[in-house]
Amino acid sequence: MYAFPSHTAASIPTSDETPTSDLPPLLVLRPLSDTWLSALNAKFTLYSPSSPLSASVHAALISGAYNRVDPALLDQYPSLRCLVNTGAGVNHINLEECKRRGVQVANVGETHSKNVADYAVGLLLDVMRRITMSDRYVRNGLWVTRGNYPLGSKLGGKRVGIVGLGSIGSAIAKRLEAFECKISYLSRKAKPTVSYRYIPNICDLAAESDILVVSCALTKETHHIVNKQVLQALGKEGIIINIGRGASIDEPELVRCLAQGEIKGAGLDVFEHEPNIPKELIELENVVLTPHQSVFTPEAMAEVIQICIANFEAFFTGKPVITPVVAD
Amino acid sequence: MDKIGVLVTHKPLPYLEQELTRRGCRLFRLWESPESCRLEFCRENSSEIRAIVGNSNFGADAATIDALPKLEIVASFSVGLDKVDLPKCKERGIRVTNTPDVLTDDVADLAIGLTISVMRRIPSADKYARSGAWKKGEYTLTTRFSGKRVGILGLGRIGLAIAKRAEAFDCPISYYSRSEKPHPNYTYYSTPVDLASNCDILVVACALTEETRHIVNRAVIDALGPKGVLINIGRGPHVDEPELVAALVEGRLGGAGLDVFENEPHVPEELFALDNVVLVPHVASATIETRTAMADLVLGNLEAHFLKKPLLTAVV
């Protein structure tokens, strides 16, 4: 586990005294910035894991960067009936176990989808048009001494295969349509309301795509869903973009394919063993590597706080949570 | 085009060079001469040169045209014609063609790519990731692109293509143009300063003319402000470059994505240390697909001219 992000870290609140206010009690299981603290303190009485009252609190704020919601954690806080998760993914939460114990789980709905979709398109444009690499070329003075940078690839008209057409995948597809990409997708089930082509087998999807975008949740089924066969099917001219989870791709195989030119390039925001990035990737010029950044904008952070509060308020007034985790 | 003398001003796409040669043209490679000898080179070969293939860096200025009495056509490997002396060509009866439409998509794609790169600081994040710094701490927050107000200087083919893409990110679109256009969904502003005051991202997408030189000046930069982002995929001289550099270095402008500069390939070095700036070497049409399509237009125009058929994309 790495250092708390500076934009979220302050301190985990400790409130060991008996509550003097009648604000509903909320267990906080992740670090919070001052912005978070002041917003939450206005509505709830905050408790940290070290408080003796933590085992009696019914609602908790969690994040995949700091928490695994497994039977052990649920045993530790047996009164929990509502969890609100601040990040985009829920692969750290045992959803069946929560359901079995009657614990509602909420995330933040579509708040992260826009930022993640923007980032996916940004990474794709960067790889195709070599933005990061040619920026580096300019800053190293090479435009003057070596002349023009090698040509990139046109995005328009290219076939994009989206792995996982949830709210993030849909937002990516909507954006890429404006660039005149041809969209196909893989999902657990076909979606009759979308106009994109459904291809139920991932190797077929890769074979018929110039660009593969991984935007699915990480589950047992999608672990290493992009494997050697899929990468071979994508082929020498293929590009892969991953803004989902590193473990959706067989990383050593991906690295090998990139290093040996068996696929053309990649834009990766996530890795199997963050914050470690394979050394071989760092040496390549046909990749863009970013440190799991796709959700982090102040605009989204502000919206996340509001939606989390709204979910907790719904729960405390006996209503169902507003943005329950939907498995699709 | 057998034995037709063609002055090529810049190192061409290999495909273009091969095709010109295959069709029988005699190529005169101007870029191989040192700058001070170029007019002399033209004069020495003026009895043969009937066509120029220019580009965005070196087109056909008055002195070059004067040195070539047999010049009949300038086929520019670009859509911008700011480096071609159009009045002189008209006066001499010289035809001028460019490469519109085939590069519109790539240029618009790069405008959006630069915008996301600047706002989400992708090159800087990439550098952070590669340096190993991620093991010690997280990268900073960056600014969301979706929903931001995009202002476009010039609503021609390229400006419209940029607007269409930005709309997919739910960006409200506004523009400045010489006259209002029939686009009810886009807000018109009658001056560049008004446009800059009312947008978060200002994109330069107009042609370079006498009127638009330094259209992005100190007043426009001030109006765009410390949270504003400038994207230039037009021409370097659209922007008062020293003012832009000062504003970025001093934090009076939020960021910039620049494909073009006043004195290419020279880029102000004060920009190199900035994380809120993305600098690319005039690559807006630089894909193999588009450059090939541009070459085909150049070849098509030249052939049409010498076969006395209608030109494909004539401007003069």
Image (cartoon, coloured by chain):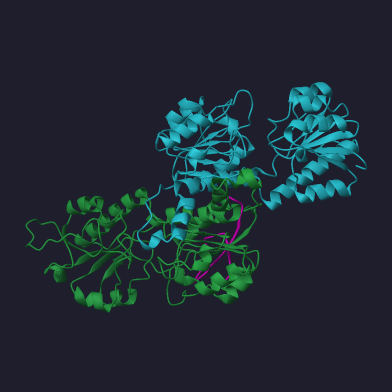
Chain colours: A green, B cyan
Q: Is residue A320 left or right of residue B106?
A: left
Whole-percent x and y of residue B56? 69, 37
Q: Please report the bounds of the magenta region as a residue range.
A: A178-200
B153 or B233, nearer to the observer: B233
- Would you say residue B169 is visible in this rendering? no
In reply to whether residue B126 is colored magenta, the answer given is no
- Would you say residue B252 is visible in this rendering? yes
Q: Quadrant of residue A315?
A: bottom left
In reply to whether residue A195 is colored magenta, the answer given is yes
Is residue A70 placed above or below A180 in the rendered structure? below
Whole-percent x and y of residue B151? 50, 35
Q: Extreme top residue here?
A: B91
Is residue B95 placed above or below A18 in the rendered structure? above
Q: Is residue B8 left or right of residue A134?
A: right
A316 or B171, nearer to the observer: B171
Is residue A307 placed above or below B190 in the rendered structure? below
Q: Quadrant of the C terminus of chain B?
A: top right
A292 or A63, nearer to the observer: A292
A196 or B203, nearer to the observer: B203
Q: Quadrant of residue A111?
A: bottom left
Q: Quadrant of residue A110?
A: bottom left
Is residue A66 placed above or below B165 in the rendered structure? below
Whole-percent x and y of residue B156? 62, 35
Q: Residue at x 89, y 47 (%)?
A: B23
Q: Residue at x 62, y 53 (%)?
A: A155
Q: Is residue A291 left or right of residue A96?
A: right
What is the magenta segment's predominant secondary structure?
A: loop
Q: Quadrant of the N terminus of chain B?
A: top right
